[in-house]
Amino acid sequence: MSSIQAITNQVLELEKLLNSSRARLDLIEHNSNASIQWQHNTEENADIFFLIMMANTIFLMQGGFAFLEAGSVRSKNTTNILIKNLLDASTAATIVSGAVAERCDFVAYLVYSSCITGFIYPVLTHWAWSSDGWLAVGFTDGPIEITYSDFAGSGIVHCAGGVAAFVAAAVMGPRIGRFDKETGNPVDIKGHSVPFAALGGFILLFGFLAFNGSSHGAISSAGDGVAVATAVKNTVLGGTGGAFLTLTLNRLKWIGDSTWSFLTTLNGCLAGMVAVCASCNQITTYGAFIIGIIGGVMYMITTWTILKLKVDDPLDATAVHFGGGVWGVIACALFSTEFGVLYHWDKRSALQLAWQLAGLSAIITWTATLSFVMFYTLKKVSLLRVSFEFEMKGLDIPKHGEPAYPAESYGHGWGETGDALGSMVEKLRNKSPTINTKTSGSPEVDSLNKLNSSVSTINTMVQNGSTETVPEKQEQTKI
């Protein structure tokens, strides 16, 4: 009996150990599953956070467009530019607003912005970036598979926007006084603030890093960080090449105006970044620099061509985005380390170049056709362009009631440098010395009397040491 009891006890102990081992195995399995789930959630959340932060940075580019365009136009149209950039929903539409600045009716802006962002651009993105888009699907030739390659949108975004901008500017016609009536030569119409344009340009250059880097779409997996860093690095080098080229060419008297032009250099830099958008994830360092240099050349050539055609583009938007975009799509087939003609020189690379050209032709044809129909229709129904008076006097006041730089907001009352009430009265007296201010009956006389009254009130307050302000209900003086 004792031996049987001992055996029974041993069996029970073994059973307890087995149950304990099973519990431990279940716990290990649970912890393993939890760890896998945690890792999956962490990776997913990291990718989402990456895209959100990049999207926030890209949204800042809209402010860059706003400052660049505002600084490149005359002060009388600043508010008009700002409200358009506030409402813009995609880069392709923003590109157009710069090309038709200072003369486009606001109703026309609402129409073309809605059509581009709601129909023209989405169709292009489906073609190239959707899994079932015909450009993305491509074709096969035996074992060779060919698909359209446009990583960050040299063609889909920038070329399309540049085409729409050119069509809009051509149909609308140049600004009043942009070309000499007798000689046909272009007349320079300067923007009102180079610092504003510079600030906008710097914001755009900063945003381009996020625009191109985020096109990779993820950051959590092995190799994602390197891929994003490669895209950002090549974007910087593309902009550097474009800026260096345009700075140098503009200094040559038989090509440029023999100056070290900041605005030309800025546009060349932007054109270089546009050019590397299509291939910034798959090119070498030197390849990005060369693509940027040629992007700068394309910008200069396109600018010259547009002026020869007497098309007025105040921001050179067509030259930057169309010139840089067209070259970027082609350059991808030449400089890609995966299939580029300059690296492989085989049937695969030749077919890729042909498909890139086919995609480019489709983008240009689709955008140009629909843009022409849209803008020509707006022109025929007299909704495309503002009146002669509005264009000459500016759009801020009649269209928006908000001048960007209201005259009454400038000056002060402390000394000769301020435009105080007293000096305003003196100016009006000098303008009309024969006016008898004691006799009312005309707006000019009434205004002068009101100014005299205001000056007398303020002088009395100062002499008496009063710190009281003029009553809020006192009627504002108008001239």
Image (spheres, rainbow, N blue to C red):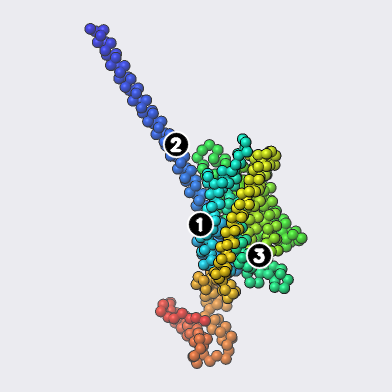
Type of residue at label 2?
Gln
Does residue 80 appear anywhere in the picture?
Answer: no
Other residues around mark 3 within 10 Å, as few (<14) / some (14–19) / many (≥20): many
Q: CA distance from mark 3 to mark 1?
A: 27 Å
Picture coordinates of residue 23, whole percent (x, y) = 33, 25
Residue 311, label in figure: 3
The answer to which of 78 and 148 lies nearer the viewer is 148
Q: CA distance from mark 2 to mark 3?
A: 56 Å
* Contact (Cβ within 8 Å) of mark 2 with mark 1: no
Type of residue at label 1?
Gly
Other residues around mark 2 within 10 Å, as few (<14) / some (14–19) / many (≥20): few
Q: Which residue is disc 2 drawn over?
A: 39
Q: Which residue is disc 1 drawn over?
A: 118
Q: Residue placed at 29% from the left, 14% from the top?
A: 11
Q: CA distance from mark 2 to mark 1?
A: 38 Å
Q: Quarter of the image for the N terminus: give it.
A: top left
